[in-house]
Image (cartoon, rainbow, N blue to C red):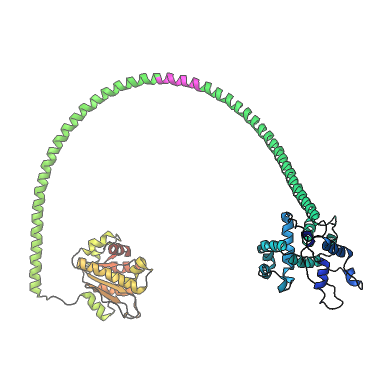
C-alpha cells in the first residue's frame, strides 16, 4: 500500500495500525500481525479502528498546498527516548526499507547503536516521514495498550510522560504537539521538583551543620573558660614566684658585693705569690742551664764511648768473617744444588729426627703480623705456608684452583722481593694436574695419600739444620705447637694475608 507525507505536514499519512497490518499480511494464518492487540486478533473479520479511518479521511480532506509546520523543540529526555526506540526496532526492518545513511548504523551493537547513531537517526526521523511511519508501526506493536491510547490522543495518568511524548512524536495523532508540550512540562516540573528537593536537602544539611557548629562552639567556649581560669591561677603563682625571685636577687647582690671585696683581697695575695714564683723560676732556669751544660759534656763522652764500642764490634765481626772464610776453605765445602726441603719433597719419607739442643732457643711464642717482615729479613730464611689454611681464611669465596693460583702468585712476589726460600704445602691425595708453573723461588708441594699437609710441614721443619730461621704460616694451633717444638717461628695466616695485600 503506497505511503505519503504525514497529515501534520499537510500530507497524507499512512495509518500506523494499517501499516502494522500490512507488515503482517504475509504472516501465516492464525498469527497476530504486528501492532494489533489480542482482542483485535481474536475477533473474526476485525478491521482497523474507527479513529484510524477518520484520521485518514481528515488527512485526505486537508489542502495539499498548506505549508508544513516546524518541528517542535523536544526535551532532551524525550529526544533520547525517541532515538532509543528507533535504535531498538531498526534492525528488524527489511534492508530495502532502511535509509542508506542508517544501514551502517543498523549493524552496530545495541549499546552503540543509540549512542553513536543518534544524530543520523534523529535526522532521518525528521526528514523521512515514510521511515518514521515504518518505525512507528513496529514501536506501537511493542507498546500495546499505551500505544493505542497515544493513537487516540490521550495519555494515561500513570504513564511515563517521556514515553508518551516519544510515542506521540513517532505516531503523530491529533493533538500530538500538545502531548509533547504536556510531557515537556511534566519533565520540567520533575526537574524543578528535583532541584527544589536538592535545595531543601542542602538547606537541611546547612541547618544540621550550623547546629553542629553551634554545639562545637559551646564546647569550645567551655574549654576557653576553663583555660582562662587556669591561666589566672598560673598568673597568681607567677606573681608569687616573681616576689620570691626579687628577694633572692637582692640577697644575691649583697653576696656579690662581699665576693667582690674578697676577690680584691685574693688578687693582692696572688700578685705577691706571682712575684715569689717568678723569683723561683729564675733560680730554676739558672740551675737548668747548668744541667744542660753538664748534659752536653756527658753526650760528648757517650759519643766517644760509642765510637770505641763500634770499633770493637767491627773488629769482632771482621774476625768472625775471616774465621768463617778459613773454616769454609779448610772444610772444602762446595756449593750445594739442593736444599733440605728439596730432599723432603723428593723422598716423602717419614723421618723421625730429634731436634738439636739449641733448636728450641730460636722459637718465638708470638703471632704479631709485624714479625713476618722482621723474620723474612733474616739471612737465608725459609718461609713454609699451610696453603689451604691461608686461602680459605683470606679468599674462601673463590674456587680451590683460583685460591691456589692467587696464593702462589703472591708468594712469588715475596720470594722476588726478599730472595728467601718459599715452600707452600697443600692437602691432596695426589699431585694436581694442570697447575701453572710455580714462580721462581717458590716450591709447591702436595701431601701424599694417607698424609696431611700438617705432617708434611713438620717434616720440612725437621729437615732444616739447627740455626736456620724457618717461618711457618698457619692458623692451626696444632701445627703451630708442633713446629715450635722443632725451633721454627709460627705465625698466623692474617700476618701473611696483610703482607700480600700490601704488596
Out of 411 and 61, give the one closest to the viewer: 61
Direction from residue 53 to residue 218 in the image, left or right: left
Residue 100, horizontal then vertical, whole percent: 67, 69
Residue 31, horizontal then vertical, whole percent: 85, 75
Direction from residue 296 to residue 433 in the image, left or right: right
Instruction: Identify which residue is drawn at 80% across, 53% down.
Output: 178
Residue 357's quadrant in the figure?
A: bottom left
Residue sitting farthest toward the right: 44
Magenta-colored stretch includes residue 187: no
Q: Quadrant of the N terminus?
A: bottom right
Out of 271 and 49, give the one closest to the viewer: 49
Residue 415, horizontal then vertical, whole percent: 22, 68
Magenta-colored stretch includes residue 250: yes
Q: Quadrant of the C terminus?
A: bottom left
Residue 228, horizontal then vertical, whole percent: 62, 28
**Mark count:** 0
Residue 273 against residue 485 in the figure, above or below: above
Out of 73 and 39, give the one closest to the viewer: 73
User: Can residue 234 be seen in this snapshot?
Assistant: yes
Residue 145 against residue 334 in the figure, above or below: above
Direction from residue 239 to residue 417 in the image, left or right: left
Out of 368 and 161, give the one closest to the viewer: 161
The magenta segment: 245-256
Q: Main secondary structure of the magenta part?
A: helix
Amino acid at each position: 500500500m503506497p505511503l505519503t507525507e504525514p497529515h501534520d505536514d499537510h500530507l497524507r499519512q499512512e495509518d500506523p495500525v494499517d501499516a502494522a497490518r500490512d507488515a503482517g499480511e504475509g504472516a501465516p494464518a492464525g498469527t497476530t500481525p504486528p501492532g494489533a492487540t489480542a482482542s483485535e486478533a481474536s475477533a473474526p473479520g476485525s478491521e482497523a479502528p474507527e479513529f484510524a479511518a477518520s484520521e485518514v479521511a481528515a488527512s485526505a480532506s486537508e489542502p495539499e498546498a498548506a505549508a508544513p509546520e516546524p518541528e517542535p523543540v523536544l526535551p532532551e529526555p524525550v529526544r533520547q527516548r525517541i532515538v532509543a526506540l528507533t535504535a531498538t526496532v531498526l534492525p528488524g526492518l527489511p534492508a530495502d526499507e532502511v535509509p542508506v545513511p542508517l544501514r551502517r548504523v543498523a549493524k552496530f551493537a545495541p549499546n552503540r547503536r543509540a549512542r553513536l547513531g543518534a544524530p543520523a537517526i534523529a535526522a532521518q526521523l525528521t526528514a523521512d516521514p515514510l521511515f518514521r511511519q515504518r518505525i512507528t508501526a513496529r514501536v506501537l506493536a511493542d507498546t500495546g495498550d499505551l500505544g493505542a491510547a497515544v493513537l487516540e490522543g490521550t495519555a494515561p495518568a500513570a504513564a511515563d510522560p517521556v514515553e508518551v511524548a516519544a510515542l506521540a512524536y513517532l505516531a503523530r495523532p491529533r493533538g500530538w504537539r500538545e502531548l509533547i508540550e504536556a510531557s515537556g512540562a511534566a519533565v520540567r516540573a520533575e526537574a524543578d521538583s528535583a532541584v527544589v528537593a536538592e535545595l531543601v536537602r542542602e538547606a537541611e544539611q546547612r541547618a544540621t551543620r550550623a547546629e553542629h557548629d553551634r554545639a562545637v562552639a559551646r564546647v569550645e567556649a567551655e574549654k576557653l573558660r576553663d583555660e582562662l581560669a587556669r591561666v589566672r591561677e598560673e598568673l597568681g603563682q607567677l606573681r608569687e614566684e616573681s616576689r620570691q625571685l626579687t628577694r633572692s636577687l637582692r640577697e644575691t647582690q649583697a653576696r656579690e658585693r662581699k665576693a667582690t671585696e674578697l676577690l680584691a683581697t685574693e688578687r693582692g695575695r696572688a700578685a705577691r705569690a706571682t712575684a715569689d714564683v717568678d723569683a723561683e723560676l729564675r733560680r730554676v732556669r739558672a740551675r737548668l742551664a747548668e744541667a744542660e751544660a753538664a748534659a752536653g759534656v756527658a753526650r760528648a763522652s757517650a759519643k766517644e764511648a760509642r765510637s770505641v764500642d763500634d770499633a770493637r764490634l767491627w773488629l769482632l765481626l771482621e774476625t768472625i768473617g775471616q774465621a768463617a772464610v778459613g773454616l769454609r776453605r779448610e772444610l772444602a765445602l762446595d756449593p750445594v744444588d739442593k736444599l733440605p726441603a728439596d730432599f723432603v719433597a723428593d723422598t716423602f719419607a717419614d723421618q723421625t729426627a730429634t731436634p738439636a739442643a739449641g733448636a728450641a732457643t730460636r722459637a718465638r711464642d708470638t703471632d704479631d703480623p709485624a714479625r713476618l717482615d722482621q723474620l723474612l729479613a733474616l739471612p737465608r730464611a725459609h718461609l713454609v705456608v699451610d696453603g689451604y689454611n691461608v686461602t680459605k681464611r683470606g679468599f674462601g669465596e673463590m674456587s680451590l684452583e683460583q685460591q691456589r693460583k692467587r696464593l702462589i702468585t703472591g708468594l712469588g712476589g715475596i720470594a722476588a722481593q726478599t730472595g728467601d726460600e718459599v715452600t707452600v704445602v697443600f692437602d691432596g691425595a695426589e699431585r694436581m694436574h694442570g697447575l701453572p708453573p710455580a714462580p721462581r723461588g717458590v716450591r709447591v708441594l702436595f701431601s701424599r695419600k694417607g698424609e696431611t699437609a700438617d705432617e708434611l710441614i713438620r717434616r720440612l721443619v725437621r729437615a732444616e739444620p739447627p740455626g736456620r730461621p724457618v717461618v711457618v704460616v698457619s692458623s692451626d694451633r696444632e701445627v703451630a705447637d708442633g713446629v715450635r717444638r722443632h725451633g721454627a717461628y709460627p705465625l698466623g695466616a692474617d700476618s701473611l694475608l696483610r703482607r700480600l695485600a700490601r704488596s
